[in-house]
Amino acid sequence: MYRIYHTEGMVLESRPAGEASKVFSLFTRDLGFLYARAQGVRETRSKLRYSLQDYSLASFDLVRGGNGWRVTSAIGKENLAAFPGEKRKEALGVEKRVATLLLRLFRGEEKDVSLFETIISSFRALKNESVSARATKDLEALLVMRILNRLGYFGKDEMLSPFLESELAEPQTLASFAPVRMRAIRRINQSLKETQL
């Protein structure tokens, strides 16, 4: 008998597997990053398909067997990619770039509730209509900087360090971060180059 793990998580990516299944890259609150297969999810009658869209937040029931993780059920909680018309392309681009970065940097299953909360709150902030196009760029740079820092790839910088602890999507945080965004981007690019991943 397999143990069932219950956890909240976000779908970072999905890809077809076999005739009707998919393998999902999930970042979960309690289990960290993992790959999980969902049988028959590509069939039109599948109840799981709507809860397993890319960039969706859901409650998952997972089992770990000899061939890895398997999704046994999922209840959709929030579509983090549902943006108002004009912001859709730009905000989806941010989510895709962040998800790609996470897939590149994650190594094995490791629980990180703080990072999970940071990413979810940032994606929710992107949906806020009061966040301008410029603030969206600031939010992306700030989020990437925090991801790199949390995963041990960023290093120290006296000017940028205060932004690693402040409330991420607060208007005053984004406004005070805007003047140092280009510095942050240079440090981000340097950090990514040094990872050699």
Image (tube, rainbow, N blue to C red):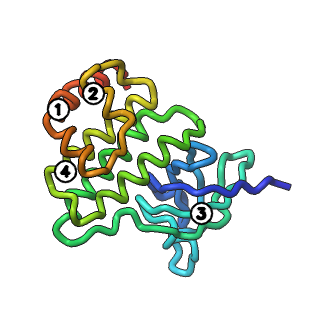
Q: Is residue 99 left or right of residue 1?
A: left
At label 2, which amino acid type do we have?
Leu
- Pinpoint residue 61: horizontal percent, then vertical percent: 67, 61
Front-most of residues 172 and 97: 172
Q: Is residue 163 left or right of residue 185?
A: right
Label 1: which residue?
Answer: 180
Give residue 184's quadrant in the image.
top left
Q: Give the CA separation, mark 4 to mark 2.
A: 17 Å
Say the numbered circle drawn on residue 160.
2
Say the numbered circle drawn on residue 101.
none
At label 1, which amino acid type do we have?
Val
> What residue occupies the far bottom of the structure in this picture?
45
Earlier-in-chain disc, 4 versus 3: 3
Q: Secondary structure at mark 1?
A: helix
* CB within 8 Å, label 4 to label 3: no
- Pinpoint residue 104: horizontal percent, then vertical percent: 40, 35
Label 4: which residue?
Answer: 135
